[in-house]
Image (cartoon, coloured by chain):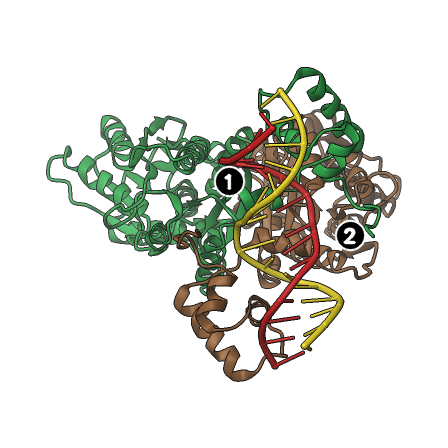
Chain colours: A brown, B green, C yellow, D red
DNA sequence: CTGAAAGCGCTAACAT
DNA sequence: ATGTTAGCGCTTTCAG
């Protein structure tokens, strides 16, 4: 004897209520056009009355799709999470784009070393159709492992070695070169840089941009101190820079947070910005508009990075071709610090 | 004729390889103790060799669980997302706690007005076992709707009306009162506040704390300008405050971002902090340590809010009882601004 | 302690 | 255009 289904309505429930078969109800639910208008109407009414909602697990089981995408944030990302607007911006961009495509965003925070395996297992379980990897450290093996596991992947940021999966990145170097030209145009001659970590592509390319930009300056020697993109490191790097070379008249910091740190050190040591030292940052996060003085910075379209990531992964899971690399432009935003 | 299963291995595949039945393999996978050690060993080996990973959709279909929890960020949250470390912190806290419990975090960004329905539909579909709602605006109907839909819910922040679902919050008022006592103890007598929006509980309670704290000051009249928790509004509110009352000697801002804004306005108008005007913020986000001067602020344990939210929802979905309200302490962190 | 069998709710041939 | 049927991969009685 079958119990009266006390639980939530199923296709069967709706079918009986509407005097149709499960298959037909399924067709209506999935928007097939081959259903007679009047019966479709009856079915829709039944669905509404019963408050029927399809069971995604059952659907996935047969379709082999889940309509959800994982966004993996590696440990290095969660570390920055608290004070840098980059990852929140990317999350938002990806989230909004996926929402429009009616896909779900599953957030995988790889906070610990061991979560590597967990992620691999999870992705293997096919709980998601594809993966967006917010990779930072270029040497990360995860993208390749995921690819080998047969999962659709797209990463944020070009990998350090050979790119084996499609990626979205920005024009780091050319943006920095624009910043350098701006400084040189301002008459600055002793231009230093606070670079990012050299095990990240963003760190390397921004440094490369600085070095290239410096070429334009007759006989100028590079002056580099490395930071980790965070504010504190910018403060400290600026100190070292001034110790090495007290008459610096400009500094390019590879992130806005480090630029803000530099600003603080400069002020503390009695340098006026931009009068004595011009400062340019990179990222154009919200904070950059509120430093003192507001930061001239290289803008990168963070939100768009997110939407493009989403776009690419959606293409990929749909079996379409995607460009192996999308590189978004950066632009110099001039404010008061340079 | 059955095709050779070219796809991923299933329970059946493993069972055959290990010479056991699906049921037994399932028992091993789910950690049943009633399996003979030698056959368990054989099965484990087969699982490893074949790289078997259970299909979560199939499992959910029968268990009616998904082992994943949704974190819903309402529109008002995504707006703040770019410059406030509160939500990223909560995400991280929730994410880490769920990871430990081997649950997945599904992020639902309610970026638009229409996503309300989408969320309800989604949750109805039982793709998640429970919901953590990062509600901001107290009047939000979503918690109640979710509860009525029979979904386990816990919210961040006490709702404005009657609390119908369990929540995690912090001691807004008492934290602010501590800040007020600190200011009064410093000898400040004309204490203003930049309040948060009054349609949010956090905004209201912090204002209530200010008013209560002011009681201690003989004959002091409240001096209030409202902001929206963001930096810009702090700058503007500070201006209005000084217009109304040029001899303010202290200000409590209901968020660090607004306090930072106030700092900038004060500096621009030639007031020294803390000499002329003492400033205290609320939140203790990373930024507070790097303002000029560093902010004295009311610390709230953002990360812990996240972990407690996760803890509560996990209890709830496990059918356990939870306290209807958990209110975490706040503490005054004294830095240079007051 | 292990296996056989039923069925979770849905979609997709295949018939009609 | 609609209905029938056969699973998707797993867990869970129920026998043995």
Image x and y of residue B189, in percent: 21, 35
Density class for disc 1 (Cα within 10 Å; few <14, some 14-19, many ≥20) is: many
Choose mark 1 or mark 2, whichever is in front: 1
Picture disc at residue A314: none
| Residue A277 visible from this viewpoint | no
The reply, left or right, for residue B146 in relation to residue A265 is: left
1 and 2 marks in contact (CB < 8 Å): no
Query: Which residue is drawn at the image coordinates 79% and 50% (left, top)?
Result: A177
- Looking at the image, the residue that sits furthest to the top is B37
CA separation in Å, label 1 and label 2: 30 Å
- Looking at the image, the residue that sits furthest to the left is B219
Q: Are marks 1 and 2 on the same chain?
A: no
Tell which of A41 and A170 is nearer to you.
A41
Q: Which residue is mark 1?
A: B91
Q: Which residue is mark 2?
A: A171
Query: Which residue is drawn at the image coordinates 34% and 42% (left, top)?
Result: B157
| Residue A23 visible from this viewpoint | yes
The reply, left or right, for residue A30 in relation to residue B80 is: right
């Amino acid at each position: 004897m079958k119990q009266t289904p006390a639980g939530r309505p199923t296709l069967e429930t709706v079918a009986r209520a509407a005097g149709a078969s499960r298959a037909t109800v399924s067709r209506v639910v999935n928007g097939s056009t081959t259903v007679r208008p009047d019966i479709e109407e009856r079915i829709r009414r039944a669905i509404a009355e019963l408050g029927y909602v399809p069971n995604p697990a059952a659907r996935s089981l047969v379709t082999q799709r889940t309509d959800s995408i994982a966004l993996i944030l590696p440990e290095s990302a969660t570390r920055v999470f608290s004070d840098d607007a980059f990852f929140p911006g990317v999350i938002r961009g990806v989230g909004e784009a996926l929402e429009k495509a009616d896909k779900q965003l599953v957030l995988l925070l790889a906070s610990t070393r061991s979560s590597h395996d967990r992620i691999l297992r999870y992705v293997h379980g096919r709980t998601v159709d594809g993966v967006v990897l917010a990779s930072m450290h270029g040497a990360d093996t995860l993208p390749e492992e995921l690819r080998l596991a047969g999962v659709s992947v797209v990463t944020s940021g070009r990998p350090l070695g050979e790119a084996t999966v499609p990626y979205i990145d920005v024009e780091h170097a050319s943006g920095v070169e624009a910043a350098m030209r701006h400084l040189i145009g301002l008459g600055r001659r002793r231009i230093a840089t606070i670079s990012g970590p050299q095990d990240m592509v963003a760190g390397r390319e921004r440094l490369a941009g600085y070095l290239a930009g410096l070429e334009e300056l007759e006989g100028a020697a590079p002056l580099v101190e490395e930071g980790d993109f965070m504010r504190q490191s910018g403060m400290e790097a600026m100190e070292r820079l001034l110790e090495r070379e007290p008459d610096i008249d400009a500094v390019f910091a590879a992130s806005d947070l480090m630029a803000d740190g530099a600003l603080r050190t400069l002020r503390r040591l009695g340098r006026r910005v931009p009068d004595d030292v011009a400062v340019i940052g990179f990222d154009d996060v919200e904070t950059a508009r509120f430093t003192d003085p507001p930061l001239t910075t290289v803008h990168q379209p963070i939100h768009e990075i997110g939407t493009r990531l989403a776009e690419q992964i959606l293409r990929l899971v749909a079996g379409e071709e995607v460009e192996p690399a999308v590189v978004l432009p950066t632009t110099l935003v001039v404010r008061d610090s340079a």
